[in-house]
């Protein structure tokens, strides 16, 4: 890997994919994306409202994580810092709405105060699936 590529003069921090594209491609930075041979990433689609909400939460979480990694190397990039904070706010809002509607996502969720270990009462994603 050519680590010199990560130097500021080789990157434009404003050249980003949107969260959906970045999530599907595995990279938010257009300048760093390299298509693998003739592989075309699948566009992910949730089948139920819960799956769609979780997918949106995952996309924003991914975008936020990518901005965080970039800021580890470029801590003075104000545009990316603002974008990270925007994604963080969006994530926290989506997470709160998701957990109010469907239950806790993690053991440290605020929803755990209301319904400890509530996720064991729901079906797991792999339960009830037909053999593929």
Image (cartoon, helix red, strand yellow):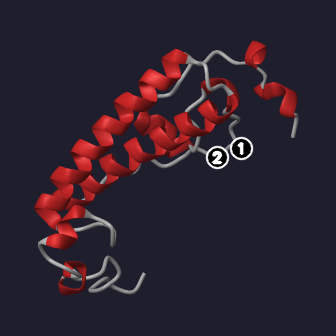
Report the residue at 22% width, 62% height from top.
Answer: 110
Q: In percent of the image, x 11 and y 60: which residue is there?
A: 101
Q: Which part of the image, by quadrant, shows the C terminus? A: bottom left
Residue 48 visible within the image = no
Looking at the picture, does residue 82 appear above or below residue 52? above
Could you tell me residue 123's position as x and y percent? Answer: 23, 83
Is residue 93 toward the left or the right of residue 77 in the image?
left
User: Which dot marks residue 54?
Assistant: none
| Residue 41 visible, this angle | yes
Q: Quadrant of residue 51?
A: bottom left
Q: Which residue was labeled with disc 1?
A: 36
Per the image, the residue denoted by label 2 is 39
Residue at x 21% of width, y 72% of height: 112
In the structure shown, which secondary structural element does the residue marked by tag 2 occupy?
Answer: loop
* x, y percent for residue 77: 58, 18
- C-alpha gap between disc 1 and disc 2: 6 Å
Quarter of image, res 105: bottom left
Left or right side of 75 for 121: left
Q: Residues at badges 1 and 2 in contact (C-beta under 8 Å)?
A: yes
């Amino acid at each position: 890997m050519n680590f010199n590529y990560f130097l500021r003069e080789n990157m434009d921090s404003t050249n980003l994919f949107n969260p959906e594209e970045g999530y599907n491609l595995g990279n938010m930075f257009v300048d760093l994306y390299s298509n693998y041979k003739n592989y075309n990433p699948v566009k992910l689609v949730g089948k139920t409202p819960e799956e769609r909400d979780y997918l949106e939460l995952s996309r924003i979480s991914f975008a936020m994580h990518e901005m965080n990694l970039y800021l580890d190397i470029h801590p003075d990039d104000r545009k990316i810092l603002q974008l990270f904070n925007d994604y963080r706010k969006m994530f926290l809002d989506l997470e709160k709405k998701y957990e109010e509607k469907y239950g806790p996502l993690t053991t440290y969720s605020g929803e755990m105060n209301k319904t400890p270990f509530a996720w064991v009462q729901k079906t797991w994603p792999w339960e009830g699936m037909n053999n593929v």
